[in-house]
Amino acid sequence: MAQIKRTPLADQAADLLLAKIRSKQWSLGAKLPGETTLATQLGVGRSTIREAIRQLAGKGVLETRQGAGVFVTALDITEEWDTVLQRAGIVAVIEARIAIEAEAATYAAERRTPQALRAIRKALKDRQKDHENTESYVDADMRFHRAIVEAADNPVLLELFDSFVPRLRQAMIEMLRLGRSLAENQDHNAHADLAEAIANRDGRSAYELSRTHLTALKGALQ
């Protein structure tokens, strides 16, 4: 026989506090009332309020500052990044990729080392080769773009790019299998020009070339 599970009071209190935050009763950066006031408002004990605050602090919504109080640091619980990407449409992912990679191309042109440039050129050469299947071609393309982001020498941008790869890879494979792609020569030239702009430390051209190429890719995917 199934048993009714009782939700702990602290969990209920955390849900109520989160509901107040979501409804904008407290704005971002606002200080929450004291434990006694909150306990009275929610009809629970102070220890329950402390546990509820601890839960929401662990989720990034609240922050306890020693001697100052409890403050709102986010207006909702942030979803896991993988979940967001899985649910997002591929066009939205490409638009985010444009924002990341165009800036990364600029930084790559400014910061690339001789070693990083060699990696970009090797990835470009590998991308030109005949590949046995669609998957290997897409993987070669991803390696080229990753080499550019890596040359930007910004670990946050690289982490963001890497998080996109699984979602992008599948979309690219599906696009190519459906026969939807950019003209081969035009596509290769776009990648070669981007690599050359980075080699010449031309940040402005690298930015524009990256943005133009990815915008065309977005159009092909729509």
Image: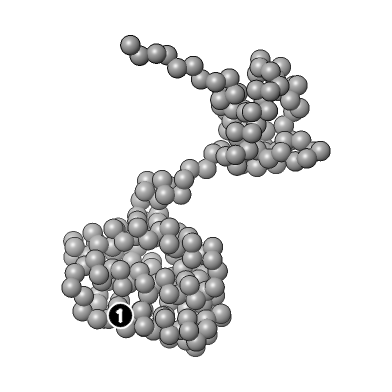
Determine whether 32 is above or below 121 in the image: above
Three-letter code, disc 1: Asp
Residue at image location 66% in from the left, 17% down from the top: 44
Where is residue 39? Give x, y as percent: 70, 20
Coloring scheme used:
one colour
| 215 sits to left or right of 106 | left
Residue at image location 19% in from the left, 63% down from the top: 177
* Residue corresponding to mark 1: 126
- Depth order, front residue of 81/91: 81
Where is residue 55? Give x, y as percent: 60, 33
Determine whether 141 is above or below 88 in the image: below
* Rendering quarter of residue 76: top right
| 210 sits to left or right of 155 | left
- Depth order, front residue of 28/81: 81
Q: Is residue 92 visible?
A: yes
Residue at image location 54% in from the left, 63% down from the top: 156
